[in-house]
Amino acid sequence: MVYRQSDFREYYLLTHDLLKEMPRISDDYFFAFANVSGQVTFISTVTFKNTTVTSNIKKYLLSRGWEEQKTCHLEAECWQRNGNREVLSVVTSTWENYVRVQIEDSPNLDIFYANNPK
């Protein structure tokens, strides 16, 4: 489901708190939410269009206790916070000129990161 911050119900019910408070690095952005059935996986994203600069996002994540990981299950920069099984990924596309920040909560990720430590 894709929505904007102005979509009051979706924004407040579906958007992860970390994404609500994340610096807006572009005026053109939208949110998405997915619940993958069968795997108990929840995915919340914000996509910033017309930018590829992530320095303010990285500063924000560090200030909130997230640490960049050496490995990632996606072609992205992955972040985790101690004691939290959620994985945050920052995808930058210079070709399409966007930055996507995705938070994923899935038991399958526990297996990946247990075998690929920080």
Image (cartoon, grey):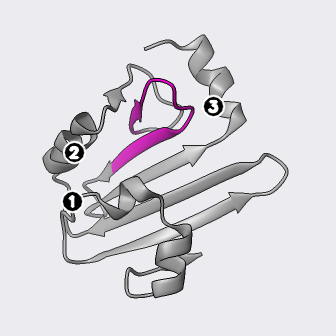
Q: Looking at the picture, how far across and down is residue 27, in whole percent?
A: 19, 77
Residue that mark 3 sits on? 109
User: Which mark lies nearer to you, 2 or 3?
Assistant: 2
Circles 2, 3 touching at the beta carbon (< 8 Å)? no
Residue that mark 1 sits on? 23
Q: What residue is drawn where x is 46% and y is 86%?
A: 8
Circles 1, 2 touching at the beta carbon (< 8 Å)? yes
Q: Amino acid at mark 2?
A: Tyr
Q: Looking at the picture, how far across and down is residue 6, in whole percent?
A: 38, 87
Residue that mark 2 sits on? 60
- Numbered disc 3: secondary structure: helix
User: Which mark lies nearer to you, 3 or 1?
Assistant: 1
Q: What residue is drawn where x is 38% and y is 80%?
A: 5
Q: Amino acid at mark 3?
A: Leu
Q: What residue is drawn where x is 71% and y is 34%?
A: 107
Mark 2 or mark 3, earlier in chain = 2
Query: Disc 1 to disc 2, how far (Cα)?
Result: 7 Å
- Numbered disc 2: secondary structure: helix
Q: Residue furthest right?
A: 38
Position of 116 with respect to 76 (left or right) is: right
Q: What residue is drawn where x is 44% and y is 22%?
A: 71
